[in-house]
Amino acid sequence: MTKIYALVDCNNFYVSCERVFNPKLNNVPVVVLSNNDGCVIARSNEAKALGIKMGTPAFKNRDLFEKHKVKIYSSNYSLYGDMSCRVMNCLARLVPDMEIYSIDEAFLLLNNLPQKPELFARKIREKILKWNGIPVSIGIGDTKTLAKIANQFAKKHPEYEGVLDLTNNPRFREYLQQIDVGDIWGVGRRYALMLKSYGVRTAWDFSKQQKNWVKSRMSVVGLQILLEIQGKPCFALEKTPKPNKTIISSRSFGRGIETQEELKEALAGYVTRATEKLRAQGSVCSALTVFVHTSKFRPDLPQYANSQMIKIPHPTDYTPNLIRHAHDVLQKIYKQGYVYKKTGVMLSGIEPKNRKQLTFFMPSREKERKEQKTMSVMEKINSRWGRGTIKPAAAGTNSITKTWRMQRNLLSPRYTTCWSELPVADADIIISST
DNA sequence: TCTGGGGTCCTAGGACCC
DNA sequence: TCTGGGGTCCTAGGACCC
């Protein structure tokens, strides 16, 4: 039986999250900025209409922000992550087969419904809005790629009221002719340029190309995209998330830093975070890469970037070990006389902990048990009292780290994940509205 | 002054082996 | 002097995604 795919996409997700707890933000331009309050990463429709572009640096938009009284927020990932879980849990209650694709998107299978997929999608939409306050758009198609395309119409054009079904759609060709080839899922800027140089401008044009032609220019991935556009599924629904093969933790600094001591401290914090993720997915790692670089936006300062990987003899998830390794690598690539803007760590060679390769020179069982116990106690304390309640001393004390930590000057409260920041209902308002 | 962070997959080419 | 051919594994770099 042919499958019917739906893509549920939260509209302007981060902005929508802010609006749930602050209705004053409705109908006015709102943007959310990346870490360090650097770039615009989410915009309300009003902000899009002002011509504020995705990914542009905040300081370049300053005039627009001021002129139109744009509401500006630092990104509040505690809030967005929690809201995302709520939306996904709702979806999971409504359909048996779903794949969480990103923080604000999920693919669903809409087969064997008692009603037409479009009707069902409208109900999903209503419920998510009612239960979570988050508006979503839903595109439906014979493949994931077509569902993605349908979603673009559902989101952009109000006449669809948030849902478009492209399966058995008599206007299928018309729709594909309106989609720029670069807006196909998986066709990025480079491929779009290449395709256009051959006169392939729209999704419809693309769907008419020869398999070999596409494969020779865009590898097998391009071929899969072609087949998907033609309605032949190549990308299956992935119901269970696969463990990550690499885990990265890195941040830009709020200010440039120069000393190795400060870099070590930052790095220790990132390793701590990365190993938390590693343990959360039940894995160990056998390699670690450290990178540092100066700011490429300061050509007036001397530039330096470097990275180095080391193999770890015994695959591990033990934070102090990995911090030690990271510091060793940093020692090798650190150079004095530069103003560093960013450092980070990547864990790789990741494998399941219960299946890890044994080696002759493994640490003793006893030692391993101790390490495990230490990590599990640390984890318990942090999950009970909040992340970072206890951490390796190498990651620095708050008073020291404060000076280089990232800027988040416009942060909203963690309304849903922190007792002390719960929204407070104003008694007068409650009384007057009842 | 101020420019994010975290992932995946594919391919070509080198090292190495028989 | 003559200097093959086929295979595997690993890595770096490029392309893409949200």
Image (cartoon, coloured by chain):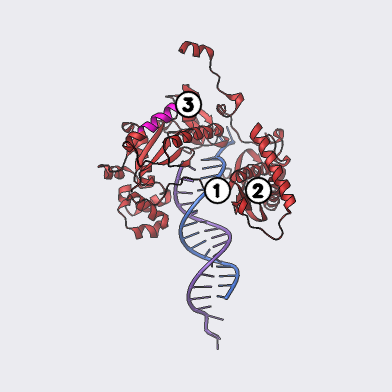
Chain colours: A red, B blue, C purple
Residue A118's tag is none
Chain for disc number 2: A
Do marks 2 and 1 share a subunit? yes
Q: Tell me whether the residue at label 2 lies in contact with that at label 1, contact meaning CB atoms closer than 8 angstroms.
A: no
**Nearer-N-terminus badge (2/1):** 1
**Res A412 quadrant in image:** top right
Do marks 3 and 1 share a subunit? yes
Image: magenta residue range: A122-133
**Res A68 quadrant in image:** top left
For disc 2, the marked residue is: A317
Q: Is residue A398 above or below residue A265?
A: above
Residue A268: x, y in percent? Answer: 68, 43
| Residue A258 seen anywhere in this rendered image of the structure | no
Asked whether A195 or A224 is in front, the reply is: A224
A276 vs A98, left or right, is: right
For disc 1, the marked residue is: A244
Q: Dot 1 surroundings within 10 Å: few (below 14), some, or many (20 or more)?
A: some
Residue A19's tag is 3
